[in-house]
């Protein structure tokens, strides 16, 4: 069984748009290579709080990252800390808020774009700070990290879907077409990444409503997809709704490392749990 994981976080991708627009990912499901769940996001359905949710498995009232303007290092044990602690190599190509949560903040674009310091929680990072930084370039950054450092855990975080959702709303050809564009990028990189022996999960922080915003409690704000490519899970479409706090312990399970004490017990149906950590 592979213990390597690529975690792809597509900012602002709501569930129904992923289901209707992402043909390559659904090809993998139809052909028995992937599974799909619906995830209910934590609240508030905002980016920085949910980055912390996804990467630490802790809710906002506890971790204190309650707004997008909460600029400080996380106080929790993240997937970066945990992989490092267990001797695994990590890397990320992400929006700069991820650097601010786990490496250093506030972010300085002049000095902090490329961070290659294995003494930090994030051992190798390439960060962008423009919301329109092309997803095509972001996935190429991720592929560079993969080829250069062969990380056991690679976190890839794209932003163009969220950006177009804010500019044009979720009920727009721009938002839907951007989801198709990301699916096409995945169709170019995932075959190589799967061939390299990685398990892959694809999910989102929050959705997007028809006013071009998120932050509320509606299914448009909260419902996001979860695709899993791993031989630990029977492929197919699962109707069970997964709480977002399950994603971090899921990542730990796929990496075969002990989750943090703050994380929920894993409850994802039909997941073959490794016999020992
Ligand atoms: Zn947003």
Image (cartoon, rainbow, N blue to C red):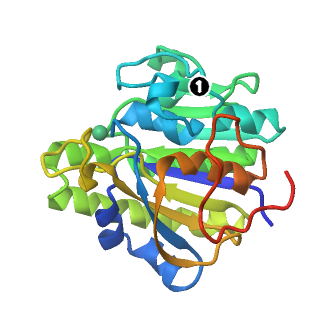
Percent x, y of residue 74: 56, 22
Examine the rendered structure and indicate whether residue 3 appears above or below residue 24: above
Q: Determine which residue is flagged by label 1.
A: 102
Q: Residue furthest bottom?
A: 31
Under circle 1, the secondary element is helix
Tell me where residue 195 sits by quadrant: bottom right
The residue closer to the viewer here, 156 or 61, is: 61
Is the C-beta of the residue carrying label 1 under 8 Å from the nearest atom of ligand 1? no
Residue 49 horizontal/vertical position (percent): 42, 32
Note whether residue 19 is visible.
yes
What residue appears at the point 44 percent right and 76 percent down from the top-left corner?
26
Circle 1 residues within 10 Å: few <14, some 14–19, many ≥20: many
Q: Is residue 219 left or right of residue 74?
A: left
Q: Can residue 96 be seen?
A: no
* Ligand 1, image quadrant it occupies: top left
Identify the residue at horizontal 73%, vertical 36% (top origin): 82
Q: In front: 219, or 133?
A: 219
Q: Quadrant of the N terminus?
A: bottom right
Q: Nearer the viewer, residue 125 or 104?
A: 104
Nearer to us in this view, 190 or 207: 207
Asked if residue 254 is positioned above or below residue 159 in the image, the reply reads below
Left or right of 51 in this view: 124 = right
Residue 22 image point, x, y percent:
37, 70
Q: How many marks?
A: 1
x 14%, y 58%: residue? 172
Vertical relation: 133 (above or below) 70: below
Task: Give the answer, above or below, for where 54 lies relative to 36.
Answer: above
Q: Position of residue 112 (x, y in %)?
A: 54, 20
């Amino acid at each position: 069984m592979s213990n390597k994981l690529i975690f792809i976080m597509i900012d602002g991708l709501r569930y129904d748009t992923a289901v209707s627009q992402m043909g390559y990912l659904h090809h993998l499901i139809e052909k028995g290579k992937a599974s799909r769940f619906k995830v209910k996001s934590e609240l508030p359905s905002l980016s920085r709080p949910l980055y912390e949710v996804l990467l630490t498995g802790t809710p906002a009232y506890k971790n204190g990252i309650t707004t997008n303007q909460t600029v400080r290092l996380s106080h929790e044990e993240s997937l970066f800390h945990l992989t490092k602690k267990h001797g695994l190599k990590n890397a990320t190509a992400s929006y700069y808020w991820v650097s601010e949560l786990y490496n250093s903040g506030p972010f300085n674009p002049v000095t902090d774009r490329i961070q290659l310091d294995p003494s930090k929680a994030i051992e190798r990072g390439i960060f962008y700070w423009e919301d329109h930084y092309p997803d095509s370039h972001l996935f190429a950054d991720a592929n560079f990290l993969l080829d250069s450092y062969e990380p056991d855990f690679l976190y890839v975080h794209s932003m163009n879907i969220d950006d177009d959702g804010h500019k044009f709303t979720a009920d727009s050809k721009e938002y839907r077409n951007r989801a198709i564009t990301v699916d096409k990028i995945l169709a170019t990189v995932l075959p190589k990444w799967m061939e390299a022996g990685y398990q892959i999960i694809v999910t989102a922080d929050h959705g997007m409503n028809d006013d071009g915003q998120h932050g509320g409690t509606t299914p448009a704000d909260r419902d996001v997809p979860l695709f899993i490519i791993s031989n630990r899970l029977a492929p197919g479409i699962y109707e069970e709704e997964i709480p977002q706090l399950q994603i971090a312990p899921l990542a730990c399970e796929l990496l075969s490392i002990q989750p943090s004490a703050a994380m929920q017990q894993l409850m994802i149906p039909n997941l073959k749990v490794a016999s020992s950590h």
